[in-house]
Image: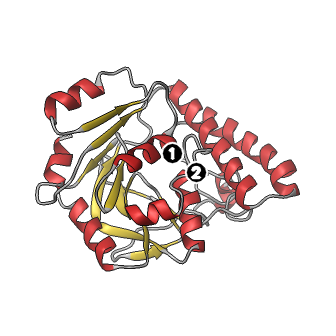
Amino acid sequence: MRHWQAAVRNIPAELILVDNNSTDGTPSLIRSTFNTARIIPLGNNTGFAAAANRGAREARGDFLLFLNPDAELDSDAVEALLDVVSNEPRAGLVSGRLRYPDGRFQSSCRRLPTKGNLLFSRGGLLSRLPSITNSDRYTLPDHKQVTIVPAAAATVAMIRRQTFAQLGGFDERFFLFMEDTDLCQRLNQAGFVNLFVPHAGAVHYWGRGSETGKWRRAVCHHTAMWRYFRKHHPGWYTTVILPVLLTGNCLIVGLLPDRRVEV
């Protein structure tokens, strides 16, 4: 939270913590550190999308910043995001540049999923074959300048509150994962542009957890992908073929050493 303080030192901001029934004492810690923070306790874990929507409904500012609990903002990240959103009337979801704790770039932007690029994603079945490794057709590379992207992660992302409300917020049928991609898809269709802002940086401790946590993440991620296809690409492929492919890939992900998966 000290990173949050530094990032908003020159910006009038409110901190809203939606507590998804945590058991680690986070609300008490926040209260003792930020006496102006607004804490919204939920009786059970409703998932990221529902919790984010609840926080957005409570917000009073013109801009919403979504921040994962496992991300640490650079001191100038919020100002950088705010500058881009404020000056681009078409701005949809505006996402920062993520990096691993060791400084390596962590891809947060991607193409919209299709049955073609899904299998060639970094965590996809075909990309694991030796003859076609490094053939990622899903995730996007790093950029040096602000860039329009089809979809961006909401790990560290900003959007106008009015725009978010206009789109109906996150689809709460996505419990975890893919809610941001779904939102970006709807923003694209509504005429907005999603943006990657490389100078809005943050460290993301992705994958922190136990082996049990890895399995759960894999199941949640692949289930969310199936929901995305069922919503945006209904048909025989999504009903018959995709569940088999996702189940197989989920098992592979669970058995292999932990790494970030973009499926």
Dot label at residue 171: 2
Viewport quadrant of the N terminus:
top left
Tell me if I can see residue 244 in this picture: yes
Which quarter of the picture shows residue 212?
Answer: top right
Q: Is residue 59 rendered to the left or right of residue 261?
A: left
Q: Are marks 1 and 2 in contact (CB under 8 Å)?
A: yes
Q: Position of residue 62 (x, y in %)?
A: 31, 63
Q: Residue at x 34, y 57 (%)?
A: 64
Q: Which mark is residue 200?
A: none
Q: Residue at x 85, y 58 (%)?
A: 235
Query: Residue 156 versus residue 16: which sits nearer the camera?
Result: 16
Q: In this picture, is 130 found above or below 251?
A: below
Tell me what residue is drawn at x 73 percent, y 65 percent: 116
Q: Residue at x 28, y 59 (%)?
A: 201
Assess disc 2: are there few (<14), some (14-19) or many (≥20) residues with their C-alpha within 10 Å of its C-alpha. some
Residue 169 point in image, percent of width and height: 50, 55
Instruction: Give the percent coordinates (x, y) of residue 52.
Output: 44, 46
Viewer can see residue 94? no
Considering only order in the chain, which callout, 2 or 1, is on the residue closer to the N terminus? 1
For badge 2, the amino acid type reads Asp
Classify 213 as above or below 81: above
Q: In the rendered image, which residue does mark 1 sit on?
A: 49
* Separation (CA) of disc 1 from disc 2: 6 Å
183 sits to left or right of 102: right
Q: Amino acid at mark 1?
A: Ala
Tell whether 10 sits left or right of 162. left
